[in-house]
């Protein structure tokens, strides 16, 4: 049956074993920590805070969209959607799973005592906070209104808002992302325990490895793009200004060269979490492990070759557009492979329905819809109609929110006992998961319809015939908001007052569950682990 | 029950607790530095991309502006940097052999050469400033028909060489730190990782210049 | 429009074609979604854990299955790719005899000019049954000219001309939206395209003529002194402009380019960029910054009129597709 190694029994009401949480107290022990688990928690709190900041902007947007003539001034609305995008993309989605769950779990999953560069790990958090301060300053000083895409020449010459402050915030936070990726790559290469071969790595690790490749190679390009934009704004040398001989479309190429791979930075960790959850709650090894592992790498590589699909109507050559469209279809294949393999894992499994698994089901359904609608946008003639409409917004919210955020919540619930040593209330969590699923679909499905009907995005006012669907979307958003607030409440409660968790509440496989105490001590293990079996060995078969 | 470490091999002061042995630590540092240099390639790559686009778009303007590139200073600087990479290699070699005085001497030489480079760069930039070739409100260009394209090309020149110079300045700071560390006996034949890592960084900055010099100064140069 | 309509009105030949492709995509996506949902729900139910269940046996994978479910979706996607590419090339490659309308976007309005000089703000009138080509220019930032009823849009990029074409089919009034964020009043940069049957259109055109674009362009041609070289000069310092537009031009570096709208615009703003074979650089003055987008379009209309096939229509398509025959429903242009 369960392959958990025996650990001494500790009755819950007796004085707690020393773990990474209680080994030291005080703000210095947190702000100067080099323990990857504490750094993960530092990130967890700051990322959650930014999520609600970004969410507040979304609330403002959806209120404005209740009426065709709008509610706020146009400039205000333009700032709302810009700040919503900047905060959500750069300060929530990009770091979310890697900096929290990745930081916490990767060393433990591979049998290491910490990441390769613990001080750089802490530095990456400070850099993230510094970037966040610049972004928040831009907000407090009046906001930015260029859209999170900062297109020139509007952003370089025409906008009167705090473009440079916001660009600095994004630039700085990019280095946090680069350092995290660098740390993961070196750790995974060099710090695996004896017997932890590449073929035995949990898919969570494979997914983060692929993500790190993109972080390391792609992020510097947006860094230099924003530098050039900032310099242009100050010096007006003309690099993006057609009146001075520059090419505004060059900005778009440079911007999307990073920002398309960035979306794979955002989704690959989510897929990585789902692999772990599906295996555990089907009590079965992932079907097609090798294919799932390599599909992560394939997505990372192909993801660098498709940026031009954002420029089909921008003035790009038709032949270039054709190449980008073709490769965009290719990159859909590895994603499809993952979905099929997860489904096949459930075949003849033993399925249970705890909250993480409910989020995983939600992910599979919503990511499928989101990914399929991406194919619509890869189809050039359809993209001509749909680009810059609400269809695109619905597409990326399905993959990012319906996919990524649900994976994040699923992962947070799955590893909550490991991180906190306590159990969350299962019934409240299931209710919240259902509320999130329903609220999400009510919010974003109408937007597919709005998009095909022709409602453009970034519109503070809209044609009156679009009102019914917009109102429906706003109603959905309020339900979704409740769905997000619920976990804040019950998870915070459970951390202080929840029942003490046993060593392995899910009877899951994996070094983090089987050989690292719950919660882990600072150096993760009591004895250095040696790996002798394949991953997800629920059936206890071959070694 | 507390989390005691298993009986570990005698750790020297430099071996961090999360590594099993010195070899693992060294390999990790090396891989980490190579990955970082990869990010630097991508960072500079964006500017090289912009340069390629505009050079192809405005070949005559490019030919015109290349007339104003100071090939003499550029060539001297190239020689200076190549020598500095050589002295850096010697510093690493000295570190491998545990020769403290030699390490310090070669690091100081490298630092001096780096400062010579920056000084000459300063002279060059001053020259450009006086000629009104710095993009911005004071920009002027001798050939009116190319004034806009020239400003873009000079903008890219300053962006690329300026970013390179900033990396040199950071490198100078790192070298200073190494000199102080060496003076305090931090390095030995058993552990000299920072010297080697910063050596890699220094070589990379040198290689970026090896690309910049021909692209900006030599190709299409007319006197 | 009823509350359950998911399609905008279909008012051009492109509309039904795009909708057909969309329905195909919906069908594929729908089938795929239903299949996944079905299997997940079915497996979750059928294999739900019950008390006393043994641990499931591992099934590590099946390469044939992986190949199958990679190749089949890939093949379906290739159909999507081919279909979408074909339609895309069609809409962005105007046929030979189009009725040209010039659209200039600026914050936050659309200025529409017709060959015979009619001008409108935020309104576009087009006839049914005739291919219309839009030549799009921007005076400031990037905009996008979007007509949902035609299923078409293209970004409007400062510093260059962009085009697309359509053939309207159904009289009525349809939305024009700006579809690239351009600042404060981006959402108010909207307009209406009015499609009229040919007779009504002819009446409308006649009723609002003010002096054709070509005539206005001719005035500019004299005002800026172009006439001194390009018409009156007997020393041959500059090429004649008769029969230039729409024909290939050989340059001094051996290249041959098509003299389209973009070429004329560049020749005015940056004459030394391309020198016609047999002529010299630095002779024509540089007009960058002296003539606005409106004036440039009028000059272009005038130069077009010096290469008459029929007034106001170009002799060839722009860009590298020039010369290749395109299918489409191009009909004989109507006399104004």
Image (cartoon, helix red, strand yellow):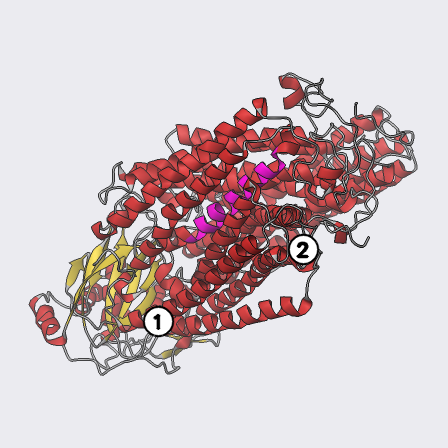
Q: What's the mark number on residue A293? A: 2
- Name which quarter of the figure residue A148 lies in: top left
Give the distance between the C-alpha atoms of the residues marked 2 and 1, in whole angstroms: 37 Å
Q: In this view, does B195 lie to the left or right of A224?
A: right
- Please name the predominant secondary structure of the magenta segment in the image: helix
Check disc 2: other Cα within 10 Å, few if <14, some if 14-19, many if 20+.
many
In the image shown, does A46 or C210 lie closer to the viewer? A46
Question: Which element type, helix, strand or loop, lies under badge 2?
Answer: helix
Q: In this view, does C251 lie above or below A357?
A: below
Mark 1 — residue? C20
Residue drawn where x is 73% and y is 22% of the image: A17
Residue C297 sits in quarter: bottom left
Q: Give the range drawn in magenta.
A: A395-416
**Front position in the image: A200 or C188:** A200
Q: Residue at x 47, y 47 (%)?
A: A402
Total of numbered circles in the picture? 2
A40 sits left or right of C161 in the view: right
Return the x and y of residue B97 as percentages of the image width and height: 92, 37
Q: Where is residue A87 in the image (x, y as percent from the top left)?
A: 46, 37
What percent of the width, then of the height, locates residue C154? 34, 62
Q: Mark 1 belongs to which subunit? A: C
Residue A255 in the image: above or below residue A430: below
Q: Give the quadrant of residue C300.
A: bottom left
């Amino acid at each position: 049956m369960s392959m958990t190694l025996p650990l001494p029994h500790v009755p819950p009401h007796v004085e707690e074993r020393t773990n990474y949480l209680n080994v030291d107290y005080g703000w210095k022990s947190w702000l100067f920590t080099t323990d990857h688990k504490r750094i993960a928690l530092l990130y967890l709190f700051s990322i959650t805070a930014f999520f609600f900041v970004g969410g507040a902007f979304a609330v403002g947007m959806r209120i404005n969209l209740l009426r065709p003539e709008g509610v706020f001034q146009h400039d205000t609305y333009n700032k709302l959607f810009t700040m919503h995008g900047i905060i959500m993309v750069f300060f929530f989605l990009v770091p979310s799973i890697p900096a929290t769950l990745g930081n916490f779990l990767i060393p433990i999953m591979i049998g290491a005592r910490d990441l390769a560069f613990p001080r750089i790990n802490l530095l990456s958090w400070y850099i993230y906070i510094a970037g966040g301060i610049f972004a928040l300053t831009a907000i407090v000083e009046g906001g930015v209104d260029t859209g999170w895409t900062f297109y020139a020449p509007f952003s370089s010459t025409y906008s009167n808002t705090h473009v440079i402050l916001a660009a600095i915030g994004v630039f700085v936070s990019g280095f946090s992302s680069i350092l995290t990726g660098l740390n993961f790559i070196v750790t995974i290469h060099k710090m695996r325990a004896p017997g932890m071969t590449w073929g035995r790595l949990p898919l969570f690790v494979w997914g983060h490895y692929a993500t790190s490749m993109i972080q390391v190679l792609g992020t510097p390009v947006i860094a230099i793009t924003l530098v050039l934009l900032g310099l242009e704004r100050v010096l007006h040398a003309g690099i993006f200004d057609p009146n001075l001989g520059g090419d505004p479309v060059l900005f778009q190429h440079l911007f999307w060269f990073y920002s398309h791979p960035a979306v794979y930075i955002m989704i690959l960790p989510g897929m990585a979490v789902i692999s772990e959850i599906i295996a555990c709650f089907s009590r079965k090894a992932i079907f097609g492990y090798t294919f799932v592992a390599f599909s992560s790498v394939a997505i990372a590589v192909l993801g660098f070759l498709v940026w031009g699909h954002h420029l089909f109507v921008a003035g790009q050559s038709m032949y270039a557009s054709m190449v980008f469209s073709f490769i965009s279809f290719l990159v859909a294949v590895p994603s499809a492979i993952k979905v099929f393999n997860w489904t096949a894992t459930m075949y003849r499994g033993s399925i249970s329905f705890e909250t993480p698994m409910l989020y995983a089901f939600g992910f599979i359904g919503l990511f499928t819809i989101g990914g399929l609608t991406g194919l619509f946008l890869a189809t050039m003639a359809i993209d001509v109609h749909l680009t810059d409409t609400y269809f695109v917004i619905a597409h990326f919210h399905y993959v990012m929110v319906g996919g990524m955020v649900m994976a994040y919540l699923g992962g947070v619930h799955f590893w909550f006992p490991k991180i906190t040593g306590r159990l969350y209330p299962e019934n409240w969590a299931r209710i919240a998961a259902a509320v999130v699923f329903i609220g999400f679909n009510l919010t974003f499905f109408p937007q597919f319809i709005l998009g095909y009907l022709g409602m453009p995005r970034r519109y503070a006012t809209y044609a009156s015939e679009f009102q019914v669907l917009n109102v429906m979307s706003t109603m959905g958003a309020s339900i979704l908001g409740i769905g997000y607030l619920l976990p804040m409440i019950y998870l915070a409660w459970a951390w202080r007052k929840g029942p003490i968790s046993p060593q392995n509440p899910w009877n899951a496989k994996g070094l983090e569950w089987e050989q690292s105490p719950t919660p882990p001590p600072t150096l993760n293990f009591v004895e250095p682990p040696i790996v002798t079996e394949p991953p997800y060995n629920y059936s206890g078969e071959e070694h | 029950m507390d989390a005691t470490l298993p009986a570990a091999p005698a750790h020297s002061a430099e071996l961090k607790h999360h590594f099993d042995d010195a070899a693992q630590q060294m390999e990790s540092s090396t891989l980490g530095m190579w990955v970082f240099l990869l990010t630097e390639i991508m960072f500079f790559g964006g500017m090289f991309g912009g340069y390629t686009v505009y050079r192809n778009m405005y070949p005559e303007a490019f030919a015109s502006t290349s007339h104003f590139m100071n090939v003499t200073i550029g060539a001297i600087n190239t020689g200076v940097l190549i020598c500095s990479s050589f002295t850096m290699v010697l510093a690493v070699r000295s570190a491998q052999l545990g020769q403290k005085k030699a390490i310090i001497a070669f690091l100081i030489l490298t630092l001096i050469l780096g400062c010579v480079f920056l000084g000459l760069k300063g002279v060059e930039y001053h020259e450009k400033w006086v000629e009104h070739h710095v993009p911005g409100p004071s920009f002027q260009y001798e050939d009116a028909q190319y004034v806009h394209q020239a400003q873009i090309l000079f903008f890219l020149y300053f962006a690329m060489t300026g970013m390179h110079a900033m990396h040199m300045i950071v490198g100078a700071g790192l070298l200073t730190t190494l000199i102080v560390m060496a003076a305090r006996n931090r390095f030995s034949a058993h552990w000299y990782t920072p010297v080697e890592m910063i050596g890699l960084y220094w070589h990379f900055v040198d290689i970026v210049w090896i690309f910049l010099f021909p692209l900006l100064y030599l190709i299409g140069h007319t006197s | 429009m009823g509350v359950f309509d998911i399609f905008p009105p279909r008012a051009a030949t492109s509309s039904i074609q795009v909708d057909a492709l969309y329905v195909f995509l919906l069908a594929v996506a729908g089938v795929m979604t239903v299949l996944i949902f079905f299997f997940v729900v079915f497996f979750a139910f059928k294999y739900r854990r019950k008390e006393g269940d043994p641990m499931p046996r591992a099934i590590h994978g099946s390469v044939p299955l992986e190949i199958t479910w990679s190749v089949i979706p890939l093949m379906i996607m290739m159909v999507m790719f081919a279909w979408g590419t074909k339609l895309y090339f069609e809409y962005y490659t105007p046929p030979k005899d189009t009725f040209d309308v010039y659209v200039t976007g600026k914050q936050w309005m659309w200025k529409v000019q017709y060959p015979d000089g009619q001008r409108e703000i935020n309104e576009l009138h087009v006839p049914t049954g005739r291919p219309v080509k839009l030549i799009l220019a921007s005076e400031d930032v990037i905009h996008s000219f979007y007509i949902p009823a035609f299923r078409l849009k293209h970004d409007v990029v400062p510093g260059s001309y962009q085009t697309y074409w359509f053939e309207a089919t159904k009289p009525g009034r349809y939305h024009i939206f700006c579809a690239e964020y351009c600042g404060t009043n981006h959402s108010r940069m909207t307009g209406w395209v009015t499609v009229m049957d040919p007779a009504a259109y002819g009446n409308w055109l006649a009723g609002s003529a003010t002096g054709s674009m070509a005539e206005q362009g001719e005035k500019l041609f004299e005002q800026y002194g172009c006439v001194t070289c390009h018409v009156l000069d007997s020393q041959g310092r500059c090429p004649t402009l008769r029969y230039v537009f729409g024909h290939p031009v050989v340059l001094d570096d051996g290249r041959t380019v098509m003299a389209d709208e973009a070429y004329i615009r560049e020749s005015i703003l940056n004459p030394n960029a391309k020198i016609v074979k047999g002529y010299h650089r630095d002779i024509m003055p540089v007009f960058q910054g002296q003539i606005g987008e409106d004036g440039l379009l009028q000059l272009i209309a005038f130069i077009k009129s010096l290469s008459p096939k029929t007034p106001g229509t170009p002799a060839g398509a722009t860009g590298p597709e020039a010369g290749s025959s395109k299918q489409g429903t191009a009909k004989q242009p109507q006399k104004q």
